[in-house]
């Protein structure tokens, strides 16, 4: 059966194009699409407070003489999660740098992050307590760099903020790191000790783990002090 209308339908189909997808607003949570309002007064000097994540994931205010928690991160070891709370800055694509310095050896461990500050109701913005990537993740342990214990000893903490307009503010203070994360204290005390040796295994519950005394060792062998098992 002839279909004289078929060429016309095919021609119309060839000339038409699918409708473009609706335009979407860039996600304000993505640094490249940040449209957050300016925090505070653009003509004023930036104001910054240092904050940190505590052992229960809470926000701690950090000042000279404060304790600061050594936290177990996804990559292992122990880190200081140092963040900021600030105003009179552009909250988009802020650079936050954190550094921990051993006062004895002057060795430093540092970390830089670019992030969007989360606005709060008081005209400030801060690192997001629900997102550890918005904090400077300063890798402190295993301790392969400080001559003293990384806990219960004073260290120098430096935190700086630079917004995309070049405004910058820096805080330098003395803090005391603590192994105070519930259920992880023993492992922290082991790997953050001043006499920690690379390759030493730390038991999460009992501290130092000696492979020679593992449950798999020969039960008939002498004990660690040379006596009978």
Image: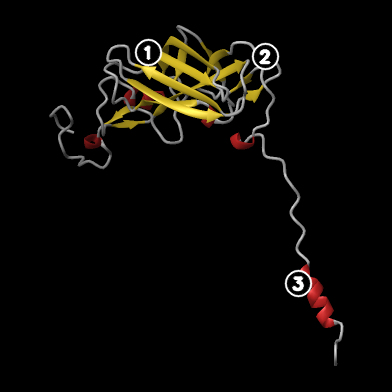
In the image as oriented, which residue stretches furthest toward the left? 226
Residue at horizontal 55 percent and vertical 25 percent from the top: 57
Q: Earlier in the sequence, mark 2 or mark 3?
A: 3
Q: Is residue 111 left or right of residue 197?
A: right
- Residue wearing tag 1: 155
| Callout 2 crowding tier (Cα within 10 Å): few <14, some 14–19, many ≥20 | few
Report which residue position mark 2 lands on.
41
Quadrant assignment, res 208: top left
Residue toward you, 110 or 226 = 110
Residue 101: percent from left, percent from top = 36, 16
Screen quadrant of the N terminus: bottom right
Q: Give the CA distance from mark 2 to mark 3.
A: 56 Å
The answer to whether any part of residue 53 appears in the image is no
Disc 1 is placed on an element classified as strand
**What residue appears at the point 39 percent right and 18 percent down from the top-left corner?**
100
Give the number of marks: 3
130 or 183, nearer to the observer: 130
Mark 2, mark 1: which one is toward the viewer? 2
Residue in the foreground of this view, choosing between 110 and 209? 110
Q: Quadrant of residue 126?
A: top right
Residue position for label 3: 14
Q: CA distance from mark 2 to mark 1?
A: 34 Å
């Amino acid at each position: 059966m002839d279909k004289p209308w078929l060429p016309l339908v095919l021609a119309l189909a060839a000339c038409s194009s699918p409708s473009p997808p609706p335009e979407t607003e860039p996600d304000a949570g993505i640094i490249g699409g940040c449209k957050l309002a300016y925090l505070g007064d653009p003509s004023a000097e930036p104001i910054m407070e240092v904050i940190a994540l505590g052992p229960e994931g809470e926000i701690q205010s950090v000042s000279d003489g404060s304790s600061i928690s050594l936290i177990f991160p996804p990559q292992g070891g122990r880190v200081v999660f140092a963040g900021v709370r600030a105003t009179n800055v552009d909250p988009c694509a802020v650079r936050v740098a954190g550094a921990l310095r051993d006062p004895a050896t002057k060795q430093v461990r540092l970390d830089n992050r670019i992030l969007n500050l989360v606005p709060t109701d008081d005209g400030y913005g801060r690192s997001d307590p629900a997102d550890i990537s918005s904090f400077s993740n300063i890798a402190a342990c295993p301790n392969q760099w400080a001559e003293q214990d990384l806990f219960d000893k004073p260290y120098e903490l430096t935190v700086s903020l630079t917004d995309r307009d070049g405004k910058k503010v820096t805080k330098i203070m003395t803090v005391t790191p603590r192994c105070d994360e519930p259920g992880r204290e023993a492992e922290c005390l082991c790997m953050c000790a001043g006499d920690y040796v690379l390759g030493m295994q730390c038991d999460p519950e009992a501290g130092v783990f000696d492979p020679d005394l593992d449950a798999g060792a020969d039960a008939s062998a002498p004990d660690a002090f040379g006596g009978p098992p």
